[in-house]
Amino acid sequence: MGKERLDNAAPIVYGVKARKYELTERDFDESIEDPIDAQEVFDYIRDINDPEHPYSLEQLNVVQEDLIKVYNEKEDPWVDVQFTPTIPHCSMATLIGLAIKVKLSRSLPPKMKTVVRITPGSHNTEEAINRQLADKERVAAAMENPNLMSTVNQCLVPREE
């Protein structure tokens, strides 16, 4: 794809957060319940590839740990992820949101619900896209579309370092 066809031909590339984990004995004790937190969710989605550029969503600042909220309620656990497209008219915003939803559905416990939405004020059609991402039937239909899932899966394949 030529640069003239990209929505954002020259995106700003940001530094990535260091991956540092200090393991303790608690981490290896299977009897201790380890609740999911924003850092864990961020680690699942930070390396998703942008569909237009050779960068991760973290490198483009599309996903940020401080825009992730985790509610570990016993009966109804859920995660709220906001993402920020690189430009207000990004045509890939729905695809990015779907990639985040798919990655989380494959990574989180089955009982944990996910809400994926555009950061308020960051996209021209955020309300319509948020409605699409919140519509279970639409998301399920998208996940049954082989061409669309091929594109989503390409976003989820780790890049060679």
Image (cartoon, rainbow, N blue to C red):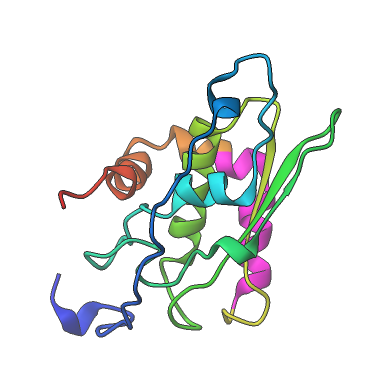
Residue 94 visible in the shown view: yes
Indicate the position of residue 106 as horizontal and vertical percent values.
49, 31
Indicate the position of residue 2 as horizontal and vertical percent values.
13, 76
Residue in the image at 51% along x and 83% along y:
88
Residue in the image at 61% along x and 53% along y:
133
| Depicted 30 relative to depicted 57: above or below | above
Residue in the image at 44% along x and 57% along y:
95
Please name whichever residue, 131 or 30, is drawn nearer the observer in this view of the structure: 30
| Depicted 47 relative to depicted 6: above or below | above
Q: Which portion, as a residue range, is magenta?
A: 125-139
| Depicted 57 relative to depicted 3: above or below | above
Please name whichever residue, 138 or 75, is drawn nearer the observer in this view of the structure: 75
In the rendered structure, the answer to whether residue 161 lies left or right of residue 147 reads left
| Quadrant location of the N terminus in the rendered image | bottom left
In the rendered structure, the answer to whether residue 56 lies left or right of residue 105 reads left
Indicate the position of residue 34 as horizontal and vertical percent values.
66, 30
In the rendered structure, the answer to whether residue 20 lies left or right of residue 122 reads left
